[in-house]
Image (tube, rainbow, N blue to C red):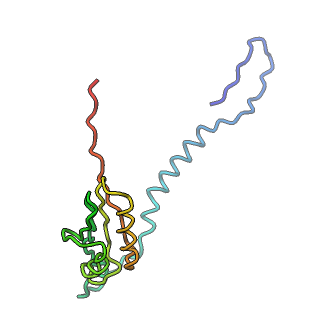
Amino acid sequence: MAFALRNQNDSEVAPMADMNVTPLVDVMLVLLIVFMVAAPLMAVGVPVDLPKVAAKQLNEQKPPIAVSIDAEGNFFIDQKAVTSESLFDELNAATENDKERRIHVRGDKNVTYGKVIEAMGKINASGFTKVALVSEAPAPSAPSPR
């Protein structure tokens, strides 16, 4: 907000040259909110009555395959123990050769970094592209007493 300080003795009042932008900002914020609320309503298409079909869904969501590495460096597919050499074949069998299946790699926090990279390398060499590392989220901390 702009204002000018004047002396009591000044007989001539100089016009204020500063523009008050507070009302402009208020109006712009209201317009922004109106457009944010109205934009999703304008994106809706023409209402149509869609036909019923007996086809199955295109995105069949299968649960991800878990590849685990325990503290000793042993590999597991879900709960089945596998060797490092047979990881490729067992993974293809578990996913039924579906290369679009999600793979979750779960490594023990005490296992060496090289074992986790070895597992990810074998999974990548198998042709799987949807590979994710799984970690545990920290427990929410209790508020401290004051």
Q: Which is more toward the observer, 75 or 78? A: 75
Which residue is at the far right? 12
Position of 138 with respect to 40 (left or right) is left
The residue located at (74%, 12%) in the rendering is: 8
Residue 107 % position (x, y): 30, 60
Q: Is residue 96 above or below residue 16?
A: below
Q: Picture quarter containing residue 7?
A: top right
Q: Which is more toward the observer, 123 or 49? A: 123
The residue located at (41%, 70%) in the rendering is: 44
Q: Picture quarter containing residue 25?
A: top right
Which residue is at the far bottom? 54
Residue 142 % position (x, y): 26, 36
The residue located at (39%, 62%) in the rendering is: 114
How many marks can you see? 0
Q: Picture quarter containing residue 86?
A: bottom left
| Quadrant including the N terminus | top right
Q: Is residue 135 above or below residue 123?
A: above
The residue located at (78%, 25%) in the rendering is: 14
Which residue is at the far left? 79
Residue 78 % position (x, y): 22, 69
Residue 122 % position (x, y): 37, 74
Position of 46 with respect to 68 (left or right) is right
Q: Which is more toward the observer, 70 or 27? A: 70
| Quadrant including the C terminus | top left
Q: Is residue 20 above or below residue 124?
A: above
